[in-house]
Image (spheres, rainbow, N blue to C red):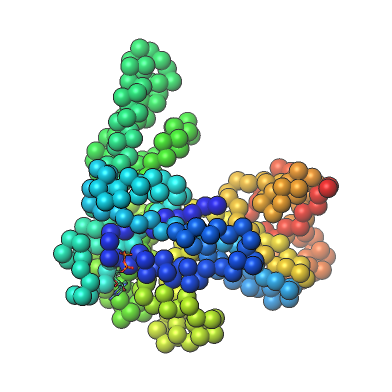
């Protein structure tokens, strides 16, 4: 499963956010394969389209698609040199698909900041520098390995060396690998190295309850937004303490609490959605009287591959997928009306899925 790793300096609110995630965690009954690793929290991806489908089909069960967050403890200054839990931290982060970086934007004199003051830009630079150092080490090791081969005229080694040198330049400039553009061929190399700073990143500005209705009243949040704009990254404003409380409530109480706070959507829901989008994940639906369900697929997947997400047998025996779009269904109001309008398509093996597809797979057993 795809997972986003939660990182940040000590005392910025990572555990509080992770508690919110585990409070909101899915019920194991619906997700028998959900992981039980204590560092992993599995959450439902909120999707109003699935709610709409459920209203229409009135199924016995409505099942949201899920997403994982991994709590990655122990980043301190010097991690790339093995300080604190440094090496373990870097190995854990390498296994994730995206990085969620929690940044302290709340003032509280009772909670010490490791560097003595609240300064989100300095904190982001501290963390990102550790990740850059780790990637530099990867690059230098690899250059050492292939340099001779490249100089002796090996074409492939020469190509790789060129890519590595470009990456090294960027890293030495204190910039992440993701700030570079790569050709398709280069991407093959880049993927293999699994650079930490090539992973997509999103920032969480953890702020006090008093700021959450209008985050722009918090100057630290504004500094962070200004700073991360340069790299095109998003900042999700959250009050981790509130999220921890919200996630423990049932839907009704949650709504009352959110109305009190003056917010329309919980910060955690927003974070889940934004992280999902950051990873370029798409959703298709299956519907019926028993179950309406959302499934995650990745861009470019074909209909048989999508069938395979549900069950390998569906992929192996794939014949075709009856497909229509959620938007069309909302426009026409029912499957019968869709059929009359010719809006239900019969898609074959080469069909590439589109976000919002509703699919019914025909297969041989
Ligand atoms: P971690 O070390 O990054 O995991 O940080 P924790 O989640 O353990 O939080 C450190 C301390 O900050 C705890 O005492 C939290 O209760 C507190 N804290 C977390 N978020 C907030 C916040 O939004 N406002 C305030 N005032 N305190 C917070």
Of residues 76 and 199, the one nearer the viewer is: 76
Ligand 1 position by quadrant:
bottom left
Relative image position of residue 48 (x, y in whole percent): 59, 71
User: Which residue is drawn at the image coordinates 40% and 49% (left, top)?
Assistant: 92
Expressed as whole percent of the image width and height from the top left, the position of residue 214 reads 34, 77
Query: Eyeballing the image, is 173 above or below 163?
Result: below
How far across and how far down the image is residue 184, in percent?
Answer: 48, 34
In front here: 227 or 362? 362
Q: Is residue 178 visible?
A: no
The reply to whether residue 266 is visible in this rendering is yes
Describe residue 357's horizontal placement relative to residue 232 as left or right. Answer: right
Residue 355, compared with residue 109, is above or below; it is: above
Residue 9, given in percent of the width and then of the height, sits at 28, 59
Where residue 28 sits, quadrant-wise, is: bottom right
Q: Is residue 272 left or right of residue 361?
A: left
> Is 267 on the left-hand or right-hand side of 337?
left
């Amino acid at each position: 499963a795809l997972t986003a790793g939660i990182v940040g300096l000590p005392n910025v609110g990572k555990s509080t956010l992770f508690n919110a995630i585990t409070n909101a965690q899915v019920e194991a009954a619906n997700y028998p394969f959900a992981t039980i690793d204590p560092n992993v929290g599995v959450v439902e991806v909120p999707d109003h389209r699935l709610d709409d489908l459920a209203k229409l089909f009135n199924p016995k069960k409505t099942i949201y698609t899920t997403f994982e967050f991994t709590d990655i403890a122990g980043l301190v200054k010097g991690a790339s040199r093995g300080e604190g839990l440094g090496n373990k931290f870097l190995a854990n982060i390498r296994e994730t698909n995206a990085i969620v970086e929690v940044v302290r934007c709340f003032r509280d004199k009772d909670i010490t900041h490791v560097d003595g003051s609240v300064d989100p830009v300095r904190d982001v630079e501290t963390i990102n520098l550790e990740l850059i150092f780790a990637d530099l080490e990867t690059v230098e090791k690899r250059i050492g390995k292939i340099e001779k081969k490249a100089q002796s005229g090996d074409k492939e080694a020469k190509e790789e060396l060129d890519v590595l040198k470009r990456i090294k330049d960027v890293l030495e400039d204190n910039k992440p690998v993701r700030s570079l553009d790569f050709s398709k061929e280069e991407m093959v190399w880049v993927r293999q190295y699994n650079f930490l700073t090539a992973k997509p990143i999103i920032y969480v500005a953890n702020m006090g309850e008093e700021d959450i209705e209008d985050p722009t009243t918090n100057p630290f949040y504004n500094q962070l937004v200004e700073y991360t704009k340069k790299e095109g990254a998003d900042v999700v404003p959250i009050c981790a303490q509130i999220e921890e409380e919200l996630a423990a409530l049932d839907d009704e109480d949650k709504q009352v609490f959110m109305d009190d706070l003056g917010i329309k959507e919980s910060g955690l829901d927003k974070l889940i959605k934004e992280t999902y989008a950051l990873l370029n994940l798409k959703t298709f639906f299956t519907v019926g009287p028993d179950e309406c369900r959302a499934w995650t697929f990745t861009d470019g997947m074909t209909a048989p591959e999508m069938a395979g997400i549900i069950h390998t047998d569906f992929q192996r025996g794939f014949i075709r997928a009856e497909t229509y779009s959620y938007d069309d269904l909302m426009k026409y109001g029912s499957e019968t009306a869709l059929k009359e309008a010719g809006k239900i398509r019969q898609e074959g093996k080469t069909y590439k899925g589109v976000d919002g597809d509703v699919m019914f797979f025909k297969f041989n057993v």
